[in-house]
Amino acid sequence: MNKLDNDYQDLLSDVIGDGVEKTDRTGTGTLSLFGRSIKHKMEDGFPILTTKKVAFKTMVTELKWFLKGDTNIKYLQDNNCKIWDGDYKRSGRTDGELGPIYGKQWRDWNGIDQLENLIVGLINEPDSRRHIVSAWNVEDLPYMTLPPCHYSFQCYVADNKLSLMWNQRSADLFLGVPFNISSYGLLLELLCAETGYEPGELIGRFGDIHLYKNHIEQAEEQIDRYSFELPKLGLTYYDIYRGDFDAILTDYKSHPAIKAPLSN
């Protein structure tokens, strides 16, 4: 068994047991709690759930898209990544654009490359408390297909180890959070490769953490599953500035995926 899966299952149990009923933009309805977190030591293995299979390649494609600063759905569709299809369809746009979302803000916030500034700062001023990247550009929010759910992340260096904490205003616990955990874990590994630090801790902080009502049965199934040892990650090639890398998981053993409808 591994602690990451156990902590995630505890979050599922907490929301099912203590969550309050709330409405949402999809009309599905949720059980919701406010203010929860999850923490993982990277030395324990790559942070990907084993109590259900997580679509690693899909997560990699989306992270590459962010790092490239791309906001057009074409790259995702060309690489068989469909997780933004619902938001794009709902937007009514036909030009492929999703607006100035994550990648635009990370790589070009009014002309500022936040990713580059972060890496330079981590190398030259490791003790700074300003290692922050934000996607919550208030001026651009009206033009985004979907305002950022995970809206910022902060890095911290101590004892030659780099840790990362991300903040999330809205956390779809069953479908979204497993992706977020692995995506920020992979981003941490890429930042370590670029800066020379060892991976430290990965921390996620959630505001509204919720289960859609049509995911409760699936969540209960996952709670009953035992976990496996976490896999290891290998980077055979990386160019973080171009959003280009080859990431390979070794010894990823998991239970089968659990199908659940997208509530979008």
Image: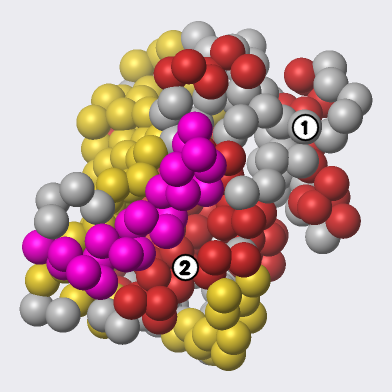
Residue 98 visible in the current orientation = yes
Q: Is 123 within the magenta?
A: yes
Inter-mark Cα distance, 2 to 1: 25 Å
Q: Residue at x 44, y 12 (%)?
A: 22
Labels 2, 1: front one: 1
Q: Position of residue 44 (x, y in %)?
A: 29, 79
Q: How is the image coloured?
A: secondary structure
- Mark 2 or mark 1: name the one nearer the start of the chain: 1
In the image, 64 versus 256, the foreground residue is: 64
| Residue 173 versus residue 54 in the image, above or below | above
Q: Residue at x 58, y 90 (%)?
A: 236
On-image quarter of the C terminus: top right
Question: Residue 207's image quarter?
Answer: top left
Q: Residue at x 47, y 68 (%)?
A: 186
Q: Which mark is residue 79?
A: none
140 vs 50: above or below: above
In the rendered view, does 62 fall on the left or right side of 32?
A: right
Q: Is residue 33 left or right of residue 219?
A: left
Measured as percent of width and height from the top left, residue 105 is found at 51, 38
User: Mark 2 and 1 residues: CB-CB less than 8 Å, in contact?
Assistant: no
